[in-house]
Image (spheres, helix red, strand yellow):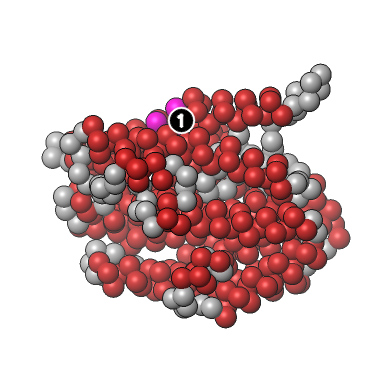
Amino acid sequence: MTGAGSQGTARSRGRLTELDLLRFVAALAVLAFHYFIAFASVWGDRPSELFPAISTLSGLGILGVELFFMISGFVILMSIWGRGLGAFALSRLVRLFPAYWVSVGATAAVYGLTAATALNPKLSPGEYGVNLTMLQRAFGVYDANGVYWSLWAELRFYLLISILVLVGVTFNRCLVFMGVWLLAAGFFAGSENTWVDLVVMPKYAAYFIGGMAFFLMTKHGPKLILWCMAGISAGLAVNAALDRVSGRVELVGYAAMPVPGWAVATTVICFYVLMAMVALGWLKWLRWRGLAVLGALTYPLYLFHTTAAVLIVPVLRDALPPWLTALVTLLAAMAFSYLVYRLVERPVQEFVKSRRRRPGAPPSPPPRMPFAAGEKASVP
C-alpha cells in the first residue's frame, strides 16, 4: 500500500487523460439519451421506435450525468489541494461561464430568431438574463436549456467543498467531510424536503463522495477506509439511480424508455469499477494525445447538443433516414463545440492566466489535470 500511495501521489500531479475519455463517454451517453429516447418533440415521433436496436442502451444514457458527478468529485478535490478560496472560485468561474453564456445566448437566439418550437422554454428576455447567472433555479426561473439542471448541482457541490478550502484540505478533514455528508445523504434518502435537497443533495451526493474517495486513493493509496467510503456511496448511488430511472419510466412508459432495473444497477456499479481502475492506475496506458481534444469538446458538447438537435433534426428528419440525421446532427454539434472551445473558452482562460502571472515571472505551464462536468479540458 505504501508503494501504491507513492505512485498515486506522483500521478495526482499529472494529467489523467483517462478521465478525459470517461468525460467524453459521459457526454455521449447524455446525448444518446436525448437524441434516441427523450427528444420526441424534436423528431415528431417516439425516438425509441425510430432507433429500437439501441433504445435500452440509449435509455441508460440518462446516467451519464451521474458519471460526470463522480468525475467532478475526483477532479475538484484534486484541484483544491493547496489552493485558497479565491483561486478556487476564480478557476470555477473561468471554466464554467464563458461557454455557458454563449449557450444561453444561442438558446435565446434560436427561439427568438428562428421558427424552432421543440423544447422551447418560453422564457422572457429577463428570464434569459437570470439564466446567465446560473442561479435561475434559486430564483424560481426555468432553465433555458434542460441540461442546466446539473450545473445547479455542481454549483452546490462547489459551495459545500469550499468548506474544506476554508479550513484547509487534509486527508483527515476530507474523511470527516465525506463521512458527515455520506451519513446525511443516507439518512435523508428519499426525503422530499426542499432544504434537504438543496443542501444535502441526497440524490447525487454519493457520486461526488465516491469520486472524492477515488482521488484520495491516487494520493494516499487504496486504504481500507476509502474503500468503505466508496462501497457505501455505491450502495446509495444504486438506490438513487433506480429511483431516478424508475420515475422516468413511470412518467413516459416502458415502451418509450425500455430500461430494466438490473441494467441501471449494473451501469452504476460499472461507473465505480471504472473510477477504481483510474485510482489504481490500471488505465494509465490510455495516453493518446487525441483524448485531450475529446476532453476539450465535452463541456461545450454537453451544453450545445440540444440546440443542434432543435435546429437540425426537424429540417432533415423527412429527407434523410433517422440514423443519418442523427449522425449529421452529432457531427455538427461536435464541430460547433470545438469552435466554442477554441474561440471562447481557451482565449478567456489564457487571458485570465496571463493577468494573474507575476510581472517578470516566466510563463507557467498549462494545467495538467482533467476537468469535470461543467468544465473545460486543456477539457464536461
Question: Secondary structure under badge 1?
Answer: helix
Q: Position of residue 89 (x, y in %)?
A: 64, 45
269 or 300, nearer to the observer: 300
- Residue 342 screen position, x and y as percent: 51, 26
Q: Is residue 15 magenta?
A: no
Q: Which residues are magenta?
A: 336-340
Q: Is residue 358 above or below residue 16?
A: above
Question: What residue sits right under mark 1 in the picture?
Answer: 340
Count of numbered badges drawn on the protein: 1
2 vs 296: above or below: below
Task: Assess whether residue 337 is covered by the magenta stretch.
Answer: yes
Amino acid on which disc 1 is placed = Val
- Image point 47% across, 78% down: which residue? 190
Left or right: where 60 falls relative to 327: right
- Measuring 46% from the left and 30% from the top, which residue is drawn there? 340
Q: Which percent across, then down, holds residue 315?
A: 18, 36
Q: Is residue 307 left or right of residue 374?
A: left
Q: Residue at (67%, 42%) from the top-left corner?
A: 369
Residue 289 lies, with reference to residue 243, above or below; the image says: above
In-front residue for pair 280/268? 268
Is 27 situated above or below 377? below
